[in-house]
Amino acid sequence: MRKTILALAIPAATIMMASAHAANVYNANGSSLDVYGKVEADMTHAGSTGDSDAKGDLTTSARLGIKGETRVNDNVSVFAKGEWQVAGQNSDGSKFTTRKAYLGADFGKDGKVSFGQQNTPLYTSLTQAIDIFDQWGMEAQTGIYGESRQASQAIYSNTFGNLDVQAGYQFRNNDGKDIGAISKNTEQDNAYSLAGVYHIGTGLNLRAAYARQNFGNGITNTYAFNPATGGNTVTSVSTGNSDGKIDTYGLGADYTLNDLYLAFVYLGSKTDNGAAVNSNTSMNSYDLVGAYNINQYRLYTGYGLQKTNADGSSSQNSVKSYKLGLEYNITPNALTWVEYRHNNADGTYDGAAGYAKNEVALSGEYDF
């Protein structure tokens, strides 16, 4: 999850974290280029994918990002950002991953447009408010579209008085379809979203977001030459569900008073796989978090609940998680933390997700 340095884990702080430690390597003739990154080491006693038995482990990772901006004229500038993460040799199977890769244009009061892999409007305007944990967090949003980054997006952002708005369109891709009754093999045709944040001005922000995903017919055609006919033979293979769709919606609020930060987010999702019966699956997540700064220390906690209800079955707690953490900022760009998580979902959900009953982490991070 996201980290903060000597700041409450509010959205503005998390957005600016990389900028605060970025090294400006070029700034001339209206163009600038910054480089930033971090190295993290985690000692954990926790579960792992498909295994809910807690085991001790030490993993490391490094992240590197670059961002540039060039002013075209007094009203327009263009920008781009790339961010990648690499795991230590024994830390995970995905050795090198792209986190962000996008470019865009800033038209000043007329807003910004950006294209590529980036945070979704749902994350920027809604779920970012509860993303305050150093190690874990946001378990209740697992499997719900838009809780983090997505590829192939076009996003428009602007501010109108106290209201920040974002509108997004996502092109055909293979992301964000691992929920409910939609098969993982189903290709997403497109998705669109709309989100906003209203700043009341007393430390209180109100948030709302909506997204719709549309899926194809789940059929893949393959063609092979048939010598007997002299033409091609078509083979149709079902790779998913027909005419599926997923609606995601949410509301939230956050409040800051001096060193205290509180936030709540509700995020719901309803899946229709297009079948005549047993086609709907709904997921509802509830997250409440809080943080308090005391000099170089940050104490933070949270509770997350996800309820899943499929047609023909009763509602179950698919995620139920309590978290408590203490962060110590050694310097403005180095920190360490200890974090505890207790998981108590119904049935086999924790085991499938790799969550142990009780988990603890002791970690450190250096930002540059």
Image (cartoon, rainbow, N blue to C red):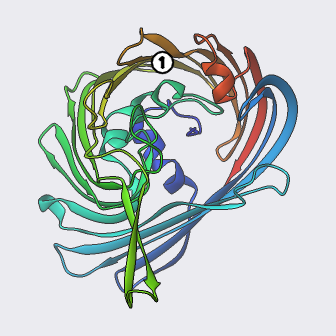
What residue sits 76% from the left and 39% below the top?
Answer: 364
Q: What is the x, y in percent for residue 83?
A: 54, 63
Left or right of 9 on screen, residue 273: left
Q: Quadrant of residue 250?
A: top left
Q: What is the x, y in percent for residue 225?
A: 45, 85
- Taking depth in this image into account, of 151 and 278 the one nearest to the observer is 278
Give the residue type that dot 1 points to. Answer: Val
Determine if residue 255 is in view: no
Left or right of 66 on screen, residue 111: left
Determine if residue 291 is in view: yes
- Taking depth in this image into account, of 49 and 184 the one nearest to the observer is 184
Height in image: 152 above or below 138? below
Q: Quadrant of residue 53?
A: top right
Left or right of 172 on screen, residue 290: right
Q: Quadrant of residue 241?
A: top left
Q: How many marks?
A: 1
What residue sits 85% from the left and 52% below the top?
Answer: 90
Q: Quadrant of the N terminus?
A: top right
What residue sits 43% from the left and 53% below the top?
Answer: 239
Q: What is the x, y in percent for residue 282?
A: 34, 23
Dot 1: element: strand
Question: Which residue carries the number 1 mark?
Answer: 289
Q: What is the x, y in percent for residue 57?
A: 86, 36
Height in image: 333 above or below 337? below
Q: Residues within 10 Å of mark 1 (few under 14, many from 20)?
A: many
